[in-house]
Amino acid sequence: MTQSTATLTDNQTVLDALNACVAACENCATACLHEEHVKHMVGCVLLDRDCADICALTARFVARNSPHAKHIMRECIELCQLCHNECAKHNDTHCQLCAAACKACLEACKAHLESN
């Protein structure tokens, strides 16, 4: 396996986690806005949106092998943790799925940072 192939393979794992997190956060935010108790979900929606945005930005930096990807990824890990913590508090299925995606994403990002 060549160096460029190994890098592509390593990047694909974290890119998949980042993109899955974007989708889960966007879905969660939309579903929260339709909840009967929507005012109770404001914190969740705000974190979902921030998390989706940082994950999308991180994916773009990783995909182009930017030397700044590590800085962005550290912020991504922080926001994924916050979003995970918030969503895990709620019993709604969409929140639980989002919490799981955020946890998987932050773990993939940590592993990616450790390997690079």
Image: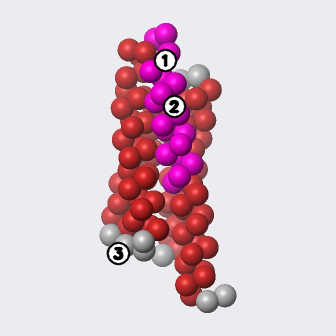
Q: Residue 83: which numbered mark, if any?
A: none
Q: Position of residue 30 (x, y in %)?
A: 48, 28
Q: Is residue 103 visible?
A: no
For residue 68, side relative to residue 93 (left or right): left
Q: Decide: is 20 above or below 29.
A: below
Q: Nearer the viewer, residue 9 or 40?
A: 9
Q: Position of residue 115 (x, y in %)?
A: 53, 74
Q: CA distance from mark 3 to mark 1?
A: 40 Å
Q: Position of residue 100 (x, y in %)?
A: 59, 41
Mark 2 is surrounded, within 10 Å at the Cα level, by few (under 14), some (14 to 19) or many (20 or more) other residues, namely: many
Secondary structure, magenta segment, majority class: helix
Q: Residue at x 60, y 82 (%)?
A: 5
Give the position of the N terminus as an image quadrant.
bottom right
Q: Is residue 34 visible?
A: yes
- Looking at the rendering, the stretch of residues picked out in magenta corresponds to 18-37
Which badge, 3 or 1, is on the more N-terminal residue? 1
Which badge, 3 or 2, is on the more N-terminal residue? 2
Q: Which residue is mark 3?
A: 67
Which badge, 2 or 1, is on the more N-terminal residue? 2
Amino acid carrying label 2: it is: Cys
Q: Which residue is mark 1?
A: 34
Image marks 2 and 1: residues in contact by CB distance under 8 Å: no
Q: Which residue is mark 2?
A: 28
Amino acid carrying label 3: it is: Pro
Amino acid carrying label 1: it is: His
Which residue is farthest bottom?
2
Q: Secondary structure at mark 1?
A: loop
* Magenta-drawn stretch contains 19: yes
* Magenta-drawn stretch contains 12: no
Which residue is farthest right?
1
